[in-house]
Image (cartoon, rainbow, N blue to C red):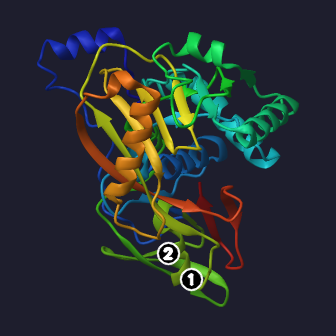
């Protein structure tokens, strides 16, 4: 039975102190065989399982997650959603994704809190100006909403920004109005709930240790709960995709690094868009609870620790305070890190490989 959420169900359950909500998905033991196994229970893995079941009619599917759903990179990011990428292939892929986001709450009947508040990408020098203008032109040729805005327009969008009296003066920015932010873990929950209704087995706390192959074909996966057979396996394991691929003797052109973020104490609304700056590696938005969600750059070395170095935090805070002086006396509440897979051209890998039945998804 499809679980539906409405104002009436919210009122009804609030009267019982929210004690009578049904479980959103089952917690089954793994079967011996599946038609398809998806390794990784984040947004990409659960979305893959959902669309395979919904659009292609597959029923015998398993999503295997070593921890809890959304506990990897899906819950360790700054929630920014945009499609203003330079390369045609990336632009089309992310534009398709953005269109899915725009209707996802309705599709899943689950509020993912997608807020299309726009994204600014700042230019701080002449090189930035040329590159960002080039990206704006490429976006327009691909039918993606993108425009160049000057410092006056930026100040109108973000009045609290210091655009002149700083080490890196703001010379302009690209602006994508349809971009925005969403509730990252809600995406995992929504996909999990609907995939479960379509018969997908979601197996948590089950680590995949090895992909077993024979004669150039995938045979299944070795897990902490035993061997599970399947002749089709998709690896969507975030920063560990290359590690698992290596167990099948596949070498992926990836570097895995920690990407950090932090949030501040909550304050009243002061910034109504997302502002990104690649030159100073700092970007910021404000959550619905009033916290400033601040993102930083990657560490300079490969790592799987999900932590990152304090020097990155210091550099990021220094840049944020310079761009927004009113944040100078705020307190930071918590910090975390996710693992990003970086390819040589910074574009995603979404592909089959030389092992028959094995696919890779490294966003």
Q: Is residue 196 visible?
A: no
Residue under the point 39% across and 66% down: 31
Which residue is more in the foreground, 343 or 130?
130
Q: Residue at x 34, y 66 (%)?
A: 305
Residue 93: x, y in percent?
72, 43
| Residue designated by label 2 | 244
Residue 317 location (% of width, % of height): 37, 40
Answer whether labels 2 and 1 touch (C-beta < 8 Å): yes
In the displayed structure, 43 sits above or below 263; it is below
Indicate whether 24 appears above or below 329. Answer: below
Closest to the observer: 91 or 3? Answer: 91
Observer-nearest residue: 257 or 280?
280
SS at mark 1 in the image: loop
Calculate the distance from the C-alpha at mark 2 to the C-alpha at mark 1.
Answer: 7 Å
Asked whether, in this view, residue 280 is left or right of residue 77, the answer is right
Kindly indicate the quadrant of the structure image that contains residue 17.
Answer: top left
| Label 1 crowd bin: few (<14), some (14–19), many (20+), radius 10 Å | some
- Residue at label 1? 248
């Amino acid at each position: 039975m499809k679980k539906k959420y409405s104002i009436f169900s919210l009122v009804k359950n609030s009267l019982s102190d929210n004690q009578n909500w049904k479980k959103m998905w089952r917690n089954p033991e793994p079967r011996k065989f599946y038609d398809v196994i998806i390794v990784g229970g984040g947004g990409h893995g659960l979305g893959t399982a959902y669309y395979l079941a919904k659009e292609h009619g597959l029923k015998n599917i398993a999503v295997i997650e070593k921890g809890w759903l959304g506990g990897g990179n899906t819950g360790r990011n700054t929630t920014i959603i945009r499609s203003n990428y330079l390369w045609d292939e990336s632009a089309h892929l992310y534009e398709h994704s953005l269109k899915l986001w725009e209707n996802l709450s309705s599709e899943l009947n689950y509020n993912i809190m997608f807020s299309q508040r726009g994204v600014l990408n700042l230019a701080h020098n002449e090189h930035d100006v040329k590159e960002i203008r080039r990206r704006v032109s490429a976006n327009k040729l691909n039918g993606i909403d993108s425009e160049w805005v000057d410092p006056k327009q930026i100040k109108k969008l973000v009045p609290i920004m210091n655009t002149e009296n700083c080490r890196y003066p703001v010379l302009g920015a690209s602006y994508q109005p349809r971009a925005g932010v969403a509730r990252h873990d809600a995406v995992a929950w929504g996909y999990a709930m609907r995939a479960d209704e379509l018969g997908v087995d979601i197996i948590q706390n089950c680590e995949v240790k090895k992909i077993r192959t024979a004669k150039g074909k995938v045979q299944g996966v070795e897990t902490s709960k035993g061997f599970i057979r399947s002749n089709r396996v998709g690896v969507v394991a975030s920063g560990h995709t290359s590690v698992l691929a290596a167990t099948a003797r596949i070498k992926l052109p990836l570097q895995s690094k920690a990407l950090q973020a932090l949030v501040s104490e909550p304050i009243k609304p002061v910034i109504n868009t997302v502002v990104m700056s690649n030159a100073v590696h700092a970007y910021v938005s404000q959550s619905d609870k009033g916290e400033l969600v601040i993102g930083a750059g990657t560490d300079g070395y490969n790592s799987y620790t999900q932590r990152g170095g304090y020097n990155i935090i210091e550099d990021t805070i220094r840049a944020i305070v310079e761009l927004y002086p009113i944040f100078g006396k705020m307190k930071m509440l918590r910090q975390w890190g996710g693992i990003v897979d970086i390819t040589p051209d910074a574009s995603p890998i979404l592909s089959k490989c030389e092992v028959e039945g094995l696919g890779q998804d490294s966003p």
